[in-house]
């Protein structure tokens, strides 16, 4: 009997080919168990720098380090087998120069085995994206609301409320696509602007807080499952696991205090 061939992961060209077709399903994951759960249903798993807030309790993504991204990226790769895994490049790891970005992107790829990296920014980051893609680094772009820039943006503010700004946002997406990004995340933009961006670029646009007519959608999995206290207004909760987890922990605590474990609870089987 021949050995079963290992399952092949989805690749950047396959995601790129989904433009205008079946919507791309994407979710974040930061651990092996969560990656295992979302893998069968997702085309893309993003190891987002949102892990700084979701997992580590940081006030923003600014304090996330490349070491943290690599550690969580390794865990997600171990827990998944099918979906393409994309790892965020954290703040300060790529903005200085294309050469800095290449050193850190290749470090992430080599240490985790992931399929691509993601970085934020429009036209200003196009030269860096081109530098990476020309040297074999698959890049997912990110335009609109860019969380790493919230200090200069004045917080998490929806982009494109003023239609006069739409051409600049569209130009950002076009510059990122022209530079070689295989897909683009459009975050926190008005629905009409997200539609225009989707129609204006030849690569898939994956929305978050954008438009249902994007080429795909991504959510922070903990938000979607109801595991976080503060969920963005645009997030539809597909589960409410937080209260259920609280109840289970409370039940466990009561069992400990009441000594109501089964008699063989401490026996390894």
Image: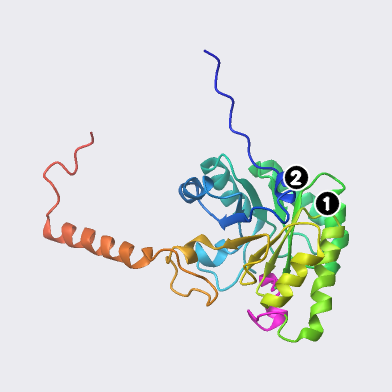
| Image coordinates for residue 168, horizontal then vertical, percent | 83, 77
Is 133 on the left or on the right of 155, as rendered?
A: right
Q: Which mark is residue 191?
A: none
Q: Nearer the viewer, residue 87 or 200?
A: 200
Residue 208 position by quadrant:
bottom right
Position of the C terminus by quadrant? top left
Indicate whether 91 appears above or below 39: below
| Between discs 2 and 1, the one toward the N terminus | 2
Q: Count of labels shown?
A: 2
The image position of residue 166, as x and y in percent, is 79, 79
Q: Residue at x 17, y 58 (%)?
A: 255
As for residue 148 lying within the magenta part, the answer is yes
**Above or below for 208 versus 30:** below
- CA distance separating discs 2 and 1: 16 Å
Given this view, does label 2 or label 1 mark the residue nearer the observer?
2
205 relative position to 180: left or right:
left
| Residue that appears at 45% across and 47% down | 33
> Quick check: marks 2 and 1 in contact, CB under 8 Å?
no
Magenta range is: 145-159
Front residue of 148/14: it is 14
Residue 70 pos. (x, y %): 62, 50
Q: Is residue 122 left or right of residue 79?
A: right
- Secondary structure of the residue carrying tag 2 is helix
Residue 207 image position (x, y, % from top left): 65, 65
| Residue 248 covered by magenta stretch | no
Give the class, few, some or many, for how many residues have Cα within 10 Å of label 2's Cα (few <14, many ≥20): few
Q: Residue furthest top?
A: 1
Color scheme of the displayed model: rainbow
Which residue is denoted by mark 1 in the rendering?
132
The residue tagged 2 is 13
Q: Secondary structure at mark 1?
A: helix
């Amino acid at each position: 009997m021949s050995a079963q061939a290992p399952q092949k992961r989805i690749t950047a060209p396959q995601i790129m080919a989904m433009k205008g077709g079946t919507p791309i399903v994407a979710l974040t994951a930061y651990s092996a168990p969560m990656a295992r759960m979302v893998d069968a249903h997702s085309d893309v798993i993003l190891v987002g720098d949102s892990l700084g807030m979701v997992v580590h309790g940081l006030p923003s993504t600014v304090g996330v380090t490349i070491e943290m991204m690599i550690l969580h990226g390794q865990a997600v790769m171990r827990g998944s087998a099918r979906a393409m895994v994309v790892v965020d490049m954290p703040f300060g790891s790529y903005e200085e120069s294309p050469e800095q970005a290449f050193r850190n992107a290749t470090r992430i790829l080599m240490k985790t085995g992931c399929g691509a990296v993601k970085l934020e920014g429009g036209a200003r980051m196009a030269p860096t994206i081109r530098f990476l893609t020309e040297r074999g680094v698959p890049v997912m772009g990110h335009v609109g609301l860019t969380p790493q820039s919230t200090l200069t943006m004045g917080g998490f503010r929806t982009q494109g409320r003023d239609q006069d700004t739409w051409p600049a946002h569209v130009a950002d997406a076009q510059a990122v696509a022209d530079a070689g990004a295989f897909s683009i995340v459009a975050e926190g933009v008005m629905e009409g602007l997200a539609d225009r961006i989707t129609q204006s670029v030849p690569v898939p646009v994956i929305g978050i807080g954008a438009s249902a007519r994007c080429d795909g959608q991504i959510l922070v999995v903990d938000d979607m499952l109801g595991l976080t206290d503060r969920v963005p207004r645009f997030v539809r909760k597909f589960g409410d696991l937080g209260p259920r987890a609280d109840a289970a922990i409370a039940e466990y605590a009561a069992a400990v205090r009441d000594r109501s474990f089964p008699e063989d609870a401490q026996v390894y089987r």
